[in-house]
Amino acid sequence: MTEVIIVRNEDEAGEIYARCVAGLIKAKPDCVLGLATGSSPLAGYRHLARLVKDEGIDVSGVRGFALDEYAGLDPNHPESYRSVITRTVVEPLGLDPAKVHVPNGNLDTIRDAGHEYDAAIEAAGGVDVQILGIGTDGHIGFNEPGSSLASGTRIKTLTEQTRIDNARFFDGDIDQVPTHCITQGIGTIMKARHLILMAFGDGKAEAVAETVEGGVSSLCPASVLQLHPHATVIVDEAAASRLRNKDYYRWAYAHKPAWQGI
Ligand code: F6R
């Protein structure tokens, strides 16, 4: 079963993620982190950076793979996912930039970039913990509704809804939001050993309910988490509001023995 943890706010969710990843880095100093952009993971990255600093955790061996990148956007653009990952993860945590990879959205090479990216993840031994946000339409990475649940990293066309949602990063102007992207496929994401999906706010409530309690369907790409052996969904009250079994999730987490781990 997908574990659902209902928290008070993004900070509490961020602390849970940070504790989990800090423990992983201590146990496996060359671990591979799956990284997401967007607002949902930010508190997690912030708390992890604090733990790394406070506890003097050595991150020199940590490797990372981002989920996605816009197609044709200059990597130096402040909203390219290369820039966002550098700003929100690499620099605050003090990771070695050479060990953190983002799919290459350069249009000249993009047709081969997906296979190469999947091969690089495989050569690194696979992702240990993948953090995920979720779109209001249920997308993970940029796998929009209808994406193959077995897909590898590839070029995708963004939906109008995703471009509207992301216009806030481009001066509110949808015309500046690229129309295409390169994204880890759902099959790629599913190979990570642990998935942690975070969602906050009532705008995500329907997508979260579909993901956890709906049927598994490409119409809600995140619902594939139901097929993953180790998936954790961390949501605030608003994002949890449409879950039918929320009393059970709350009870299970409140009574969770420490030995069970996350
Ligand atoms: C980001 C990504 C997207 C976002 C999703 C939610 O790398 O792949 O799937 O996670 O669009 O975005 P936020 O967190 O901004 O609501």
Image (spheres, helix red, strand yellow):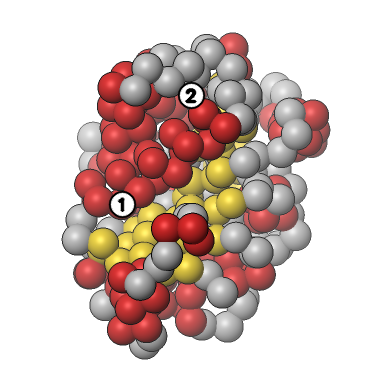
State the SS at label 1: helix
Q: Residues within 10 Å of mark 1 (few under 14, many from 20)?
A: many
Residue located beneath label 2 in the image: 82
State the SS at label 2: helix
Residue 72 screen position, x and y as percent: 55, 28
Image quarter of residue 237: bottom left
Residue drawn where x is 43% and y is 20% of the image: 57
- Which of 229/138 is in front? 229
Residue located beneath label 1 in the image: 13
Q: Give the spatial CA distance, label 1 vs label 2.
A: 24 Å
Given the image, on which type of amino acid does mark 1 rest? Answer: Ala
Residue drawn where x is 69% and y is 63% of the image: 149
- Which of 114/33 is in front? 33
Q: Is residue 111 visible?
A: no
Along the polypeptide, which appears first: circle 1 or circle 2? 1
Residue drawn where x is 28% and y is 40% of the image: 43
The CB of the residue at mark 2 lies under 8 Å from ligand 1: no
The CB of the residue at mark 1 lies under 8 Å from ligand 1: no
Q: Is residue 61 visible?
A: yes
Given the image, on which type of amino acid does mark 2 rest? Answer: Arg
Quadrant position of the N terminus in the picture: bottom right
**Residue that extends furthest to the bottom in the rendered view of this protein:** 244
Residue 115 screen position, x and y as percent: 79, 36
